[in-house]
């Protein structure tokens, strides 16, 4: 049976891959809570530690920051994201921009967040204007067309 190939299908990435689209980067990062990180510049580790993912967003005017064990990630700070499943069933995500990267790995540490849940703002349509926003909860994601 000949089944026509639909050339308009979105990618399907399972457990390992590279992501360039900012919305997909947000979705992948949202899966983290407690994490271990390594900030690498020109192949040298500049900083490492543990933290709690507090906010994932896209903004042309804000920085990615790790302060007081709280992690705020702006996907606009990076060109793309690589992820892979490790042998122990954890996931490692590496955010890459030119000669620097931020490696993130799930952490089993107890949550110490000062905030009960991640910040989530209600509209995905703002992305076209590069306004600051966080990813919608899974049941609120709408078709973008």
Image: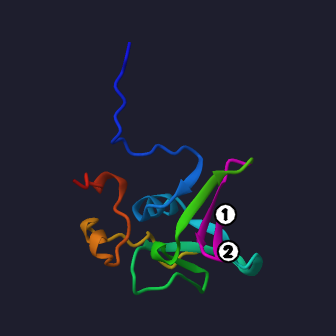
Instruction: State the residue at coordinates (52%, 81%).
Output: 64
Q: Residue furthest left?
A: 145
**Residue 10, percent across and down?**
39, 45
Q: For this rendering, which residue is in front, 81 or 6? A: 6
Q: Secondary structure at mark 2?
A: strand
For the N terminus, the quadrant is top left
On whether residue 100 falls in the magenta region, the answer is: yes
Magenta highlight range: 88-111
Distance between mark 1 and mark 2 Cα atoms? 8 Å
- How many marks the image carries: the answer is 2
Instruction: State the residue at coordinates (59%, 46%).
Output: 15
Residue 4 position by quadrant: top left
**Residue 78, percent across and down?**
53, 73
Instruction: State the residue at coordinates (49%, 85%).
Output: 63
**Residue 144, percent across and down?**
25, 55
- In the displayed structure, 42 sits above or below 138; it is below
Q: Which residue is mark 2?
A: 50
On whether residue 116 falls in the magenta region, the answer is: no
Residue 120 position by quadrant: bottom left
Q: Residues within 10 Å of mark 2 (few under 14, many from 20)?
A: some
Q: Are marks 1 and 2 in contact (CB under 8 Å)?
A: yes
Q: For this rendering, which residue is in front, 116 or 36? A: 36
- In the displayed structure, 78 sits above or below 85; it is below
Residue 107, numbered circle: 1
Instruction: Please state if 42 lies on the left or on the right of 76 as rendered.
Output: right
């Amino acid at each position: 049976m000949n089944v026509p190939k639909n050339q308009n299908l979105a990618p399907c990435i399972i457990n390992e891959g590279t992501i360039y689209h900012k919305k997909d980067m947000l979705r992948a990062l949202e899966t983290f809570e407690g994490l271990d990180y390594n900030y690498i510049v020109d192949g040298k580790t500049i900083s490492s530690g543990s933290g709690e993912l507090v906010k994932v967003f896209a903004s042309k005017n804000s920085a990615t920051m790790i302060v007081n064990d709280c992690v705020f990630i702006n996907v606009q700070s990076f060109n793309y994201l690589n992820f892979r499943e490790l042998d122990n069933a954890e996931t490692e995500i590496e955010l890459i921009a030119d000669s620097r990267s931020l490696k993130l790995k799930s952490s089993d540490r107890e949550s110490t967040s000062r905030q009960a849940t991640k910040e989530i703002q209600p509209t995905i349509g703002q992305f076209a204007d590069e306004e600051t926003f966080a990813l919608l909860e899974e049941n609120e994601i709408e078709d973008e067309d």
